[in-house]
Amino acid sequence: MRLSRYFMPVLKETPAEAQIVSHRFMLRAGMIKQTAAGIYSWLPLGLKVLRNIENIVHEEQAKAGHIPILMSTLQPADLWRESGRYDDYGEEMLRVQDRHGRDMLYGPTNEEAVTDIFRSHVNSYKDLPLTLYQIQWKFRDEIRPRFGVMRGREFLMKDGYTFDLSKEDALHAYNRHLVSYLRSYERMGLKAIPMRADGGPIGGDYTHEFLVLADTGESEVFYDSEVTDLSFGDREVDFDNVAECEAVLQEFTSRYARTDETHDEDLFNSVPEERRRTARGIEVGQIFYFGTKYSESMGATVVNADQKQVPVHMGSHGIGVSRLLGAIIEASHDDKGIIWPEGVTPFHVGIVNLKQGDDEADAACEALYKAFQKAGLDPLYDDRKERAGGKFATMDLIGLPWRITVGPRGLKNGVVELTSRKTGESEEVTPEEAIARVIAIYAAL
Amino acid sequence: MRLSRYFMPVLKETPAEAQIVSHRFMLRAGMIKQTAAGIYSWLPLGLKVLRNIENIVHEEQAKAGHIPILMSTLQPADLWRESGRYDDYGEEMLRVQDRHGRDMLYGPTNEEAVTDIFRSHVNSYKDLPLTLYQIQWKFRDEIRPRFGVMRGREFLMKDGYTFDLSKEDALHAYNRHLVSYLRSYERMGLKAIPMRADGGPIGGDYTHEFLVLADTGESEVFYDSEVTDLSFGDREVDFDNVAECEAVLQEFTSRYARTDETHDEDLFNSVPEERRRTARGIEVGQIFYFGTKYSESMGATVVNADQKQVPVHMGSHGIGVSRLLGAIIEASHDDKGIIWPEGVTPFHVGIVNLKQGDDEADAACEALYKAFQKAGLDPLYDDRKERAGGKFATMDLIGLPWRITVGPRGLKNGVVELTSRKTGESEEVTPEEAIARVIAIYAAL
């Protein structure tokens, strides 16, 4: 994209309403615009990152054998009356009446809707296991929305639902989700630690939240420092292999790691003192096995091998897609702006022309721009007639991981400057070398 | 995808509520499930086609230089009070109050929201022209939703908005949209004819609807038969070239083609009698230049070259994305089911194993399946233990353009059967030949 033809309304001033750094930078970089309290429209740069995160989630869900669907945002109240949640949910549920006076609601989550799909179409244990998921907008009418997309009212979430014949199978589905989530977050450049969560009114041991450590996190967390050394890495996992998925669960959840909701001081004290850590964390996902709560109340049964009708075992597994933009920025920024991990960056590389209008500089920038496009990468070329300082400030603010600076002086010596946003280090290299280096970085992802 | 692991709940019975063929086939093929009147959830097969259509729209909008954003579904009523439409819109607007009693609405269209984004960030004529578009869910509370996704209440639409300094520039934006729409529909396998539309209360000559001819269309249409001979084809267009885009408009709109709303009997009679046609059509898009209506009422102005504040000239340009699934099926089906055009098909090729469990047949199917995946295509392998008749009926119903049938008898002679869904013609070819033929077909798209 050529910046002169793009829509990236960067703000010079820091917006007064933004209390945390991710909100500030998302507004300043022209990524979002507030429509109403806790409701945002996504401007081009923000939308690109949102889509990148969605794509990672889709790819990892596909690898795990999970199947995408898309449920409507509006749902009839009657479905929620079946589960008993229409009355229980409280004021966070946005309730609507249509023109015929029918009670509807904007889905805050979708256990009821997906259970309705399941019971309408699946009758036999032979069609299990089944995991259906979606990435769709949801609405929760938070009383005090704040922190930008971190605690919005209209938000984008991945919600997956597992249907299994037995608790044992459902726990394998749980483990599959844990594995796929570990992979997803790592691809986004995040360390998200699974922590024992609170099962709420349903209870049960089978729920973990994924938390990203950040000073602005809403939860206090307590953990054994060894959990931050764990890394999923490149390993291949056979998602059908029960033992293999179970082993990943054990590896990543056997050490102490809990939020304040489930924190147990005595247990924590059994961790060697030098490894005990407290910090703050941002919740970016949760996995939850809850048994037959919805299948029983809503009649989601299958015929088992003995020809008996049995309720299916279910679980819900979520990733906060729009919230992740905030979490990534909280975890990866400096005073000048965002530092995007390569896996989610809106553009792969920025090209800064120090002297727009100079024939040689323009030609060199065009050549770089086209070479990256030809390689399937997405460069952002700052082709505006601005002074260099303004161009650098914009690039630092929007946080592309790599920048190539092109000026007449360097070109005389046959070089451009390749700069890492993260380290700030620059190297003079030939344009060909700069292209090859950047292509190699993304090819290795 | 292996069908044994997929979720494609095909119905044997024709659902009673479905009055038109596209609705019937979408329900029977397990593409959608009704959530409430006029509100659907998208099951895996339907979602795949929906995403394919979205991708075509995104690609063609990118080629035209238009920039994607994503606006919230819920919007504050105050924005719509500024334009005067909050009171004018009537009962099709779904109105909501949040927990604080603030008036909100579920966007039925987004002129107000996008004008608010524009006026907040753009101040100078130097930032024009600008086209922002989105593909987002909308809600119109139709009094009698029917025909499945063709006239739903919650629906997915591409809506693009153009901002220009002058009427002349705005008409170039209009023409750019016409070109990009012609390309988009052709890639979807549709002949969509631009027809002079009714400007409504705003009036003006600058609006065209795109109609697909189909017996079940809601509009009566009148046209010169020469318009159906026009084809955009492979031609390259420079979207910055005003004359080139204008010439496409002239080519595709100078012959008589109107809906009943704008039909002019006298003008129609000037078409040679043998070329006069009446038919029915489904509206799948509309382009509309409306001048300064919203920019004036909402204060969307820029400073022009003379340092004067002037309201921008705007247009709205829409494609009915979810409705297109219905329109495509109405235009392309037979008694047995859907016939997907290659550009939007949910899977590129179906593989039918006539004798699941036979070592040779299984191995041949696996080899085909993996060869297609390796080539970047998306095959659907019917690996269920069903009789051949059931497998064929399912493949015909879901309408994949190409089917490869594999059985022990053919394999003895080294051949499989390659069948066109459209013509019904089959050929015996080697597996290698079948792979090469299918790959070549999609490579040529």
Image: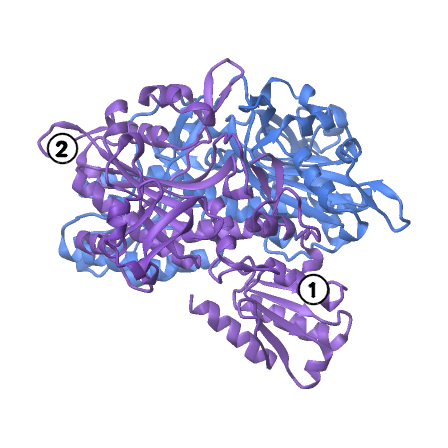
Chain colours: A blue, B purple
Q: Amino acid at mark 2?
A: Asn
The residue that mark 1 highlights is: B391
Residue A374 to residue B27: above or below: below
> In the image, what residue occupies the spot 48% across and 50% down?
B327
> In the image, what residue occupies the spot 18% across and 38% down?
B167
Q: Nearer the viewer, residue B117 or B199?
A: B199
Q: Earlier in the sequence, mark 1 or mark 2?
A: 2
Residue B214 to residue A41: above or below: below
Q: Is residue B55 left or right of residue A295?
A: left
Q: Amino acid at mark 1?
A: Lys
User: Local crowd at mark 1 within 10 Å, few (<14), some, or many (≥20)?
Assistant: some
Query: Which chain's residue wears label 2?
Result: B
Q: Is residue A426 left or right of residue B411?
A: left
Q: Is residue A24 left or right of residue A178?
A: left
Q: Is residue A346 visible?
A: no
Q: Which mark is residue B304?
A: 2
Label 1's element?
helix
> In the image, what residue occupies the spot 73% across and 62% down?
B384
Image location (x, y in percent) of residue A358 = 14, 53
Q: Is residue B134 visible?
A: yes
Q: Nearer the viewer, residue A191 or B351?
A: B351
Residue B178 to residue A93: above or below: below
Q: Nearer the viewer, residue B170 or A438?
A: B170
Image location (x, y in percent) of residue B208 = 31, 45
Q: Which mark is residue B275?
A: none
Of tags 1 and 2, which is closer to the observer? Answer: 1
